[in-house]
Amino acid sequence: MKKLTMPFAVLFLTACEPVTTQPPAVAIAAEKIGLQEYRDRVELREYTGVDPVHTEWCAAFVNAVLNESGIPGSESVSDVPLMARSFLTWGDKITKEEIRAGDLVVFPRGNQGWQGHVGFYIRSIETNNGTMYAILGGNQDNSVSIDLYPASRALGIRRNSL
């Protein structure tokens, strides 16, 4: 995955839509861009409720952002809210044609069927290798960042049903 640096990520976000029209959860998550799991371990642990050095924390980050936004996270639909794939039953199912900024996208990760990654969709980018989704999330190269993921690998797209 291609990681976007902090200054570029801010420009990337604002190029999509004016900052004032970004979904609240995206705006909250964007404030955390650049936090790294080792350097900012205490801050991330306080925010997510897990030790980012010892726990895969992408789902914990998304849940923390949703909760700060006043939206119930995957703990509202799953007994295992720290698993990225717990978001596959959260909110409403959305098609690739309906996707918009702020939707959650779940991808596979690792070699086990239960493993995954979850983050906030920012925008689509057409490349020679096909459509890529720009995803704002935690535990992307051990930090909060915007990374590019192949749209074809998405396991599910979910939208807040409230």
Image: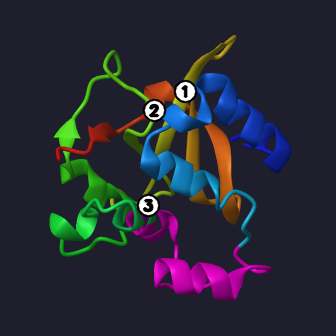
Using the rendered image of the protein, determine whether residue 27 is visible from the camera's viewpoint. Answer: yes
What element does badge 3 sit on? helix
Q: Residue at x 40, y 27 (%)?
A: 100
Q: Image point 35% across, 21% down: which residue?
A: 96
Q: Which residue is mark 2?
A: 101
**For residue 112, side relative to residue 93 (left or right):** right
Q: Secondary structure at mark 2?
A: loop
Question: In this image, 104 relative to 125: left or right?
Answer: left
Residue 48 at what x, y percent from top left?
49, 77
Closer-to-camera residue (96/47)? 47
Whether residues under marks 2 and 1 lie with C-beta atoms below 8 angstroms apart, the answer is: yes
x and y, in percent, of residue 161 in the image: 17, 44
Identify whether 107 is placed above or below 82.
above
Residue 89 tag number: none
Q: Which residue is mark 1?
A: 123
Q: Is residue 88 left or right of residue 120?
A: left
Which mark is in front, 2 or 3? 2
Q: CA distance from mark 3 to mark 1?
A: 17 Å
Q: Amino acid at mark 3?
A: Val
The residue pinned by badge 3 equals: 62
Residue depicted at 25% across the width and 30% down the height: 94
Q: Position of residue 101 (x, y in %)?
A: 45, 32
Q: Quadrant where the N terminus lies?
A: top right
